[in-house]
Image: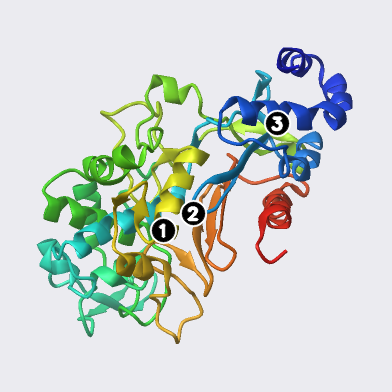
Amino acid sequence: MFIHLTCYMERPTVMWKALTRHFVPMFLTTVALASGVVAQEVKIAPAVQPFVEKSELAGAVMLVANKEKVLTAEVAGWADIAAKKPMALNSVFWIASQSKPITGAALMVLVDEGRVSLDDPVEKYLPEFRGQMVAAFRSDDTVLLRKPKHPITVRNVLAHTSGLPFQSAIESPTLDMYPLHIRVRSYAMTPLDFEPDSNYQYSNAGINVAARIIEVVAKTSFEKFLDDRFFQPLGMKDTTFWPNEEQASRIATAYKPGKNNMGLEPTTIGQLYYPLTDRTQRFPMPAGGLFSTAHDMARFYQMLMNEGLFEGKKYLSADAVKSLTSRQTPAALKNSYGLGFAVSETTFGHGGAYSTNSNADKQNGLIVIWLVQHAGFPGEGGKSQEAFKRAAYEAFSKSK
């Protein structure tokens, strides 16, 4: 069955569309079972298949788990439409800002060890931030500066309440073209946009500052710290800032809406330098530079749902996980953000620039991972993620 269906996928699009109604669910089940991950029929993929058939979604990897096991892992559509390459469970994606929770968790390792405090001023670890000013007034040709009421803290940079901008002027045309210490120095030279704790402003710069604190305190590179403390012991073997050649061959093609918002056309990841495998011209971007797979991300979230424990190894304390995944923004602000996580009373997670998303629901015990590679959607393609989540909850929610 698997061989025949693969052949069908290489035939003209008209025939494929005619066959999907009958064969796609079986094909997807075969792929999932072949991985050895799940042992049940497909439940989620049919909910998003209509978006693929209408060329509003190229393809997706969808995973639902609880804190103990993967409940289902399914695929729909294509990793590369022109090459007729089906999406696979081990397809690799740029997870973009889903990197932020991982950076937050890495910082909390040092908090657990007593080497960093969340309410310490950043300047304690990074002296270049001493004397940083806040912009009291701005016009086209004038900026009036004053001393802030208090220096930015570690908690501020992780919760987007520091007043740091989204990025600095040097982070162009791509976000990964300078080493981390140079980017962070440019943030220290940039006036804050508001008094710390007085407002919320989503900031790649703040998350990158947290990563630089890790480098200084741990006396190692940020990428090595992640490898040593999380990726290797958690078994996140495909999570990296630099995909190797084999991993790069599994990266799902990025798509954007076609002309007149009709259909899809391939695109590149404009925020990153190419080739993606280049370790000499590309540098780690802690706020949004990681590549990963659905199963790798599931392991990270399962560790958090188990209060920092995974397969018998303790990565974080329960208190650290609570701080990461509960609101850290002041009550007076409407934005609810933890330490690298978007949070609500019952959920924590994060999205990414090219439409990826991961979320954990403490009330229902579910982890949902949605990996696509889209710089926008034509038609109603943007509704595909919600269709996946709705199907996931209908199939697995405790409260259904």
As drawn, is 206 to the left or to the right of 337? left
Q: Earlier in the sequence, mark 3 or mark 1?
A: 3
Question: Is disc 2 in contact with disc 1, using a CB cutoff of under 8 Å?
Answer: yes
Q: Can residue 185 be seen by looking at this rendering?
A: no
As drawn, is 210 to the left or to the right of 70? left
Residue 26 sits in quarter: top right
Q: Earlier in the sequence, mark 2 or mark 3?
A: 3
In the rendered image, the vertical position of residue 267 relative to residue 195, given as above or below = above
Q: Dot 3 corresponds to which residue?
A: 29
As drawn, is 59 to the left or to the right of 176? right
Residue at x 26%, y 41% (from the top left corner): 223
Residues packed near mark 1 inside 10 Å, few (<14), some (14 to 19) or many (20 plus): some
Quadrant (top left/top right/bottom left/bottom right) for the N terminus: top right
Q: How far apart are marks 3 and 1 (CA)?
A: 29 Å
Q: Nearer the viewer, residue 100 or 201?
A: 100
The structure's colour scheme is rainbow
Q: Dot 1 corresponds to which residue?
A: 306
Q: Which of 115 and 142 is in front in this view?
A: 115
Question: Is disc 3 in contact with disc 1, using a CB cutoff of under 8 Å?
Answer: no
Secondary structure of residue under mark 2: loop
Q: Residue 67 carries which label?
A: 2
The x and y percentages for residue 23 are: 82, 26
Q: Nearer the viewer, residue 80 or 131?
A: 80
Quadrant (top left/top right/bottom left/bottom right) for the C terminus: bottom right
Specify the amino acid type for callout 1: Asn
The x and y percentages for residue 20 are: 83, 29
Secondary structure of residue under mark 1: loop
Specify the amino acid type for callout 3: Thr
